[in-house]
Image (spheres, rainbow, N blue to C red):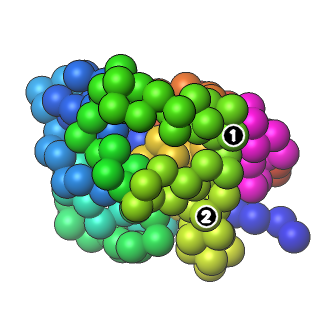
């Protein structure tokens, strides 16, 4: 099955990103760096895709993704609020670990943190979800795409897309860096960063 190209944008930086805190589905706003990153992505998208206004635009409903989408659309010259939202594109939830840094998680529950490192793709944190579970949540949203789409979401969602669409092994996908302020282009089973 041929899929439309996805221009994936991870939301811009938040203070929790800068502090290394697990955000998950907590609704943390962009910081000044994140707003600059969102603007820069708008410039990149306009350069990459002539006629970008003809594409579909879809975002996770969390505030940091909505602000990223609205800022990049404004830079492109499009109506900032004219895009779709999809609940299935929310970030992976880390359950009771959200708000903590990895050193704090390891200090509170070293055994669970070690188990997650060994089985990062399948491990379910207390009250959270695994990447495998996230993939099953995200798959129907991606399968529903019918046109080339700018998709603004989260690092965990990018990782499952790379596993699902680009034959990246789950183990490798779970550990990949997902950049803010850049565009991840996913097309024909391959990916590149712009």
| Residue to which mark 2 is pinned | 133
Residue 21 in percent (x, y) is at 28, 32
126 left or right of 49 in image: left
Please give the range of residues in magenta: 163-172
Mark 2 Cα-neighbour bin, 10 Å: few <14, some 14–19, many ≥20? some
Rendered-image quadrant of the C terminus: top right
| Residue to which mark 1 is pinned | 119
Marks 2 and 1: in contact by CB < 8 Å? no
Query: Residue placed at 75% from the left, 55% from the top?
Result: 164
Chief secondary structure of the magenta portion: helix
- Real-space CA distance between mark 1 and mark 2, rounded to the nearest whole angstrom: 13 Å
Mark 1 Cα-neighbour bin, 10 Å: few <14, some 14–19, many ≥20? some
Residue 48 in percent (x, y) is at 53, 37
Up-down relation of residue 90 to residue 1 (above or below): above
Residue at the right extreme of this rendering:
1
Q: Tell which of 128 and 10 is nearer to you.
A: 128
Q: Secondary structure at mark 2?
A: helix
């Amino acid at each position: 099955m041929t899929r439309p190209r996805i221009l994936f944008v991870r939301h811009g930086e938040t203070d929790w990103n800068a502090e290394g805190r697990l955000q998950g589905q907590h609704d943390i706003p962009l910081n000044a760096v994140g707003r600059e990153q969102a603007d820069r992505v708008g410039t990149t998208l306009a350069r990459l895709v002539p006629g970008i206004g003809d594409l579909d635009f879809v975002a996770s409903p969390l505030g940091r993704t909505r602000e990223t989408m609205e800022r990049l659309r404004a830079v492109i010259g499009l109506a900032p609020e004219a895009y779709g939202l999809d609940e299935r594109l929310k970030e992976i939830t880390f359950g009771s670990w959200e708000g903590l840094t990895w050193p704090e998680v390891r200090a509170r529950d070293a055994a669970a943190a070690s188990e997650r490192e060994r089985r990062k793709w399948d491990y379910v944190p207390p009250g959270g979800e695994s990447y495998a579970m996230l993939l099953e949540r995200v798959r129907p949203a991606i399968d529903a795409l019918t046109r080339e789409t700018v998709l603004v979401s989260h690092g965990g969602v990018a990782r499952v897309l790379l596993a699902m669409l680009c034959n990246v092994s789950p183990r490798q996908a779970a550990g990949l860096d997902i950049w803010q302020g850049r565009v991840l282009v996913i097309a024909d089973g391959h990916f590149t960063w712009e």
